[in-house]
Image: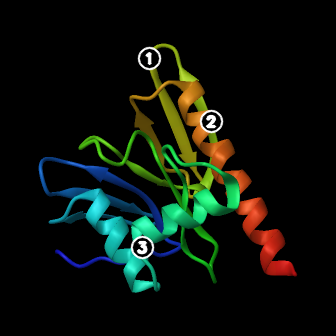
Amino acid sequence: MKDYEISKETLAIIPIGEKKSKVIEKDCSIIINNSPKNIMDESCRYYGSSIEGRQKGTMSLTGISYKAPIVVQEDNNIIFFPTTSPRLKNCMWISLNNIEDYYYDFNKNSSIILFDNGEKLEINTSFCVLNNQILKSHRLESIFQKRKAK
């Protein structure tokens, strides 16, 4: 499969090789013949912008420019954040809205994200980095919601 649009069912987009991604949804996982960044960009374009446009929007609203979370789709409040710089090939994109909890597993030396459907995702990212990304995403969500309410 090549074409894929992010929805509120999308939990994470994980790179697997040069131009392939594993997309984890609430009820299944799909292999997409496209990089996570391209999937993000195509989904943003599907909903009326581009990944660069969404990043500029985040910068304008929050001042966040590095590893910026983005609102992929406004109506359903779909917000994703990158685990590293989006320029890196190992960058995953995680759905903020589907996270139930997250913690650091000292035995595995990695962070664990628990999604609201019970799915667990182990990522090789420090808890501090993950926590910071989630906090930045919540900040964006809060500012965005306040502006929508006006």
Numbered badge on residue 132: 2
Whether residue 144 sits left or right of residue 13 in the image: it is: right
Q: Position of residue 73 (x, y in %)?
A: 54, 77
Q: Mark 1 or mark 3: name the one nearer the start of the chain.
A: 3
Q: Is residue 116 visible?
A: no
Determine the residue located farthest toward the top in the rendered image.
107
Residue 57's quadrant in the figure? bottom right
Mark number for residue 35?
none
Residue at the (55%, 35%) spot, across then down:
130
Q: Return the x and y of residue 10 as percentages of the image width and height.
A: 45, 66
Q: Which residue does the numbered mark 1 point to in the structure image?
A: 109
Disc 3: which residue? 6
**Do the residues under discs 1 and 3 have CB atoms within 8 angstroms?**
no
Q: What residue appears at the point 28 percent right and 42 percent down from the top-left corner?
A: 88
Q: From the image, which quarter does the N terminus lie in?
A: bottom left
Residue 19 in sight in this render: yes
